[in-house]
Image (cartoon, coloured by chain):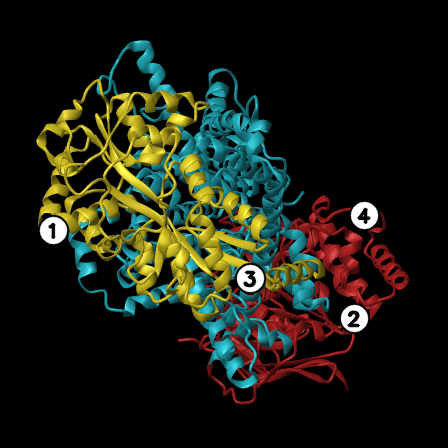
Amino acid sequence: MHKICGLAVFLLSVSLSTGVPAAEVNIYSARKENLIKPLLDQFSAQTGIKTNLITASADKLLTRMINEGQNTPADILITVDAGRLYRAMEADIFQPIESEKIEAIVPAHLRDPDNYWIALSKRARVIFYAPDRVDPNALSSYENLADPQWKKRICIRGSGNIYNQSLVASMIAANGKQATQEWAQALVDNMARPPMGGDRDQIKAAAAGQCDIAVANTYYYAKMLENKKDQAQYQAAKKMAIFWPNQAGRGAHVNISGAGISKYSRNRENAIKLLEFLLSPEAQDWYASVNYEYPVNPEVKPSGLLGSWGAFKADTLNLSKLGELNAEAVKTMDRAGWK
Amino acid sequence: MAKSKIRSPVSRLEGLWQPGILLTALVFSIPVLTIASFLLYPSGDIWQHLVDTVLADYLLNSVLLMTGVGLGTFSMGVTCAWLTSLCQFPGKKFFIWTLLLPLAMPAYIIAYTYTGMFDFAGPVQTQIRDWTGWEYGDYFFPEVRSLGGAIAMLSLVLYPYVYLLARAAFIEQSVCVIEVSRTLGCSVWASFYRVALPLARPAIVAGLSLALMETLADYGTVSYFGIGVFTTGIFRTWFGLGDSAAAAKLAAILLLFVFSLVVIERWSRQRAQYHHTTNRYSQLPVYRLTGARALIACVACALPLIFGFILPAFQLSLWAIDTYAVMIDSSFFKLVLHTILLGVSTALLAVLLALFMVYGRRVLASKLVFASIRVVAIGYAVPGTIIAVGVIIPLTWFDNTLDSYMREHFDVSTGLLLSGSLFALMFAYLVRFLAVSIQSVESGLVKIKLSMDEAARSLGRKSADILFNVHLPLMKGSVLTALLIVFVDVMKELPATLILRPFNFNTLAVRAFELASDERLADSSTAALMIVVVGLLPVILLSKSIASSRAGS
Amino acid sequence: MTFQLEVENLDVRYDNYQVLNQISFALESAKIGCILGPSGCGKTTVLRAIAGFEPAFGGRILIDQIEVSSSHYCMATERRNIGMIFQDFALFPHLSVADNIGFGLKSWPAKERQERVQELLAMTGMPAYGQAYPHQLSGGQQQRVALARAMAPRPGLLLMDEPFSSMDVDLREQLAREVRDILKQENITAILVTHDQHEAFALADEICVMNEGRIEQRDSGYNLYHQPVNRFVADFIGQGVIIPATVESRHSVRTELGSIEGKLPPQREKGALVDVLIRPDDVIHDDDSSETAIVVDKSFRGADFLYFLRMDSGIEVMCLAPSHHNHKINERIGIRLDVDHLVIFDRSN
């Protein structure tokens, strides 16, 4: 009995005794630990500021932050899509980021008009095709995927996924509700199989012949190509080619990973320092080379694999729109029977 | 008139027991009540939208999933339990404990590995195409990421619940009843269907209800397979559509399912208050199986083991061999330590609380206590994320209220006292897993006749004294079972851990999930394998305890 | 006179259902009382109320002059200084025999505890079984351990709930006598609950016959048999038949089998129609008797036969005859009455 009580008291005291060291910054991150921790460690080494991290999905972190209110320990919320940043701003848990340095680096369409949030990296959602079965000249845009010629030839993941929700939201912004509803309906008809798995699975399925076209984020494709240890994935990726949609129009759909500073942050200065660091050329380059995401800092030019794909035209829709239209996008997909 | 309901008079200290239990029950119901309270908010057109589009799908898929998993876990669990308790065949001793191993396998991990192996683009199908020259559409291969696949995955890791409880029931059955039925002209198999199986029904139903509650609460597997069930629907509605009231309505329907499960389970027990009719136990007779029969028995036991454990563990090992060097660093051992500490302390607390409540019900025999215990048990079927949200809201409310009070009156800030601490995390675990410990402790306690309590009381012992000197020694098997199952469950738990943990606090499940959900199956395998390894020890202990838990020996 | 146990107007109810109705009795120190009755009569409830497992709805219970139960109070069992033997013995299966016996001696110094356990093992004739476990013992041995365990703390009152019901019939009376000897040796006040009158006779100093929640008669075994106060007791204790009779005088009644002399209740007038209890031992087989009856059935009981006889009027009686009188069924034999205790009831219907 005493042992048990002792253990409980110990655990409680450990958990409560989060003392306040001189310099620290607390991060709630929807970016997975292995894609943020190395940068944080580097930041700590450079500045001596301690970083504390929790990772979880953005929705849950958002719920936690909103409920924690003015006592939230979080200084920074990092998400992997713009919709959640917008939602956080709507929930009034962000404050404007006051840094001329940051304003100078991040292009206007990649941050909130009032600087409540900023992008840290860009991620493009594009079309992949099997060159032996698909003539790239037949491809043109996302809208074109609804064309009857692709009947039973498209692989795309489920509608619960935020990347698809954002893509559909961007289409509603570009083409309106009605047109997007019809497009979604036609796209569901063109699916080769019910949506399942992640982005890599779509590319693999297309490579294996289950479908001819896959929709996925570029960095998954890049990781498949670069990880030669997993030969099956590498071979699958090699069988596929990348197509940049809507180059004649608004450009390829781009989402971001981004961050905002908590309204109740107690380490504001440190938080700004961290964001500045994450936008610095070395951090931006790390994203490009480790996770194959496109840098936000215009000074950093993608190298290696990303560089070899060349420049592309990206949709410059203000990303706040993605957040505004997210619920409409989910409803549209529900109505279309997009599982 | 209420007085006459007091079966056993209690001392003054024990007078606080009933209020204590009711208070405990209330505290642990807060998260579920919090979620339920969202029903009061208007949800407007979103609910109508759900009804128009996806609700029928959710309903149908949930029912199909539960039916499938129910059948799967029943057939595997009961068959293996019967074979390993009352038959003799080569390898029986090995199967007795290895059949529990899938318990250590989180459902989402097994789903990832099977997808990796049997997907269209996976090695098996690729090999088939290479050999035969077939293309897509030329041949039939069952799709892993389907409703059937989800049923298979969940059945494979959840059947041990049925196996565990059914086997314990078979072993504890007095040999007399089986012998009587044989003297009445029933064959071995007829004795099984007509006597042993009905006698074990309460245990089997208890096992099934645990398995089905886990099924209802599962999110990882169904969302990976893209199946629209209630849990996935709740997430979409809450986070995608941003409507917590409509999500709560879905959750309420989910709770309705759970509630009916609980009622069915109770009903089945009530109709069968099987106290053992004899105290005499002798060595169980074993039916020696030979030849083809022995082979069939072997295969029947081997299949769940191979598909539920060996094959996925093998695949994980293959991946881990490639990646472990990178994945095991100093932080990895901290992960293991965190995971074990959290599991052990939660398991101890869960069992203490279960004893407090279940023993209280035995001593007090109050309907109110009985009902409150059932309410607490509902948390088991509620998905971890939902519970986590239900924990965050009241705890942060408490913290912030206290904080502003202290600021106002004493000019000090207490900040977030409970939320964001391990306390919040363990609280969520207890809300979710108290049902397991209650279930197990209760099953041990009902087997002890009331005359034991009365004998001890007449010899001058008090309730607490009796609990420690009579009941606990007699039910140590059940208590151990409760400890171990809660430990394994906590270790595998993911969504609540993700959202509630304090800064810089990771567990093995978090690590495995983060990598796997990033579609890095190979990298996640080291952590996943470690979960399995850490889970093995308690599972082996568990099997030892059920092997030696023959009443009267 | 001091009573070790007093039960006064005890009422017990389960959810409005009255289980015990105005139960009153008392037991002197060092006496063995018995509550005898058919199953479902409430006898076990009396015991459980005394033990404190059931609260009293009305009335009160005193043990050793101290009130332990009343309508508004119920002392916890563990404070009542009682011992109890259960129908299923309720031995703790995880404890050895010695540990079972020592279970109630927790507060005793180790040495004294050990001595007491040894003493009881010797007293119950099981000195070699201290380290054995309950499941290794026979039913009779388990029963002795249960007795020893209950007696170990020297309780002020020992309660026994059908303690012999799981025994073989032959063993019951023998064990009952053994238990009686041990109880008397230790001067223990005890109360036994049973449905078996032979057990009651063998063990108890006085017996309460219970039926449907009330006490019908409280007396010695001898008196219960020979002077039952009503038909229920007459029927429940021993065998016998009730036959019609007419009051002849203030000292006799007339039956078909002849006159019976004895003390009549004062209000019986001459010529009144009554019923008389005739026990098998009241009917004597006598070949010289002018009264005869036909043997309808018979059962051999070793030393004697119990004959079931039908008289010409159709009335049936039972007769206990030495077993060397072996008559066939349907044979006509001579009988006569020899009634020591005249038991008269109002004529039924």
Q: Residues within 10 Å of mark 3 (few under 14, many from 20)?
A: many
* Circles 3 and 2 on the same subunit: no
- Residue B220 image-quadrant placement: top left
Residue located beneath label 1 in the image: A176
As drawn, the label of residue B407 is none
Task: Give the residue number, with chain letter if any, for mark 3.
Answer: B423
Q: Check disc 2 and report the residue beneath it.
A: C188
Is B537 situated above or below B341? above
Q: Nearer the viewer, mark 3 or mark 4?
A: 3
Q: CA distance from mark 3 to mark 4?
A: 47 Å
Q: Is residue C154 left or right of residue A20?
A: right
Label 4: few (<14), some (14–19) or many (≥20) C-alpha neighbours in 10 Å: few
Query: What subunit carries mark 1?
Result: A
How far across and how far down the image is residue B7, in percent? Answer: 55, 71
Write down the colour of chain B: cyan
Q: Chain of mark 2?
A: C
Q: Nearer the viewer, mark 1 or mark 4?
A: 1
Q: What residue is rendered at 44% in x and 58% in y?
A: A76
Extreme bottom residue here?
C267
Task: Give the vertical position of C191 relative to B276 (above or below).
Answer: below
Q: Earlier in the sequence, mark 2 or mark 4?
A: 4
As measured in the structure, the alpha-carbon distance from the residue carrying label 3 to the one carrying label 2 is 56 Å
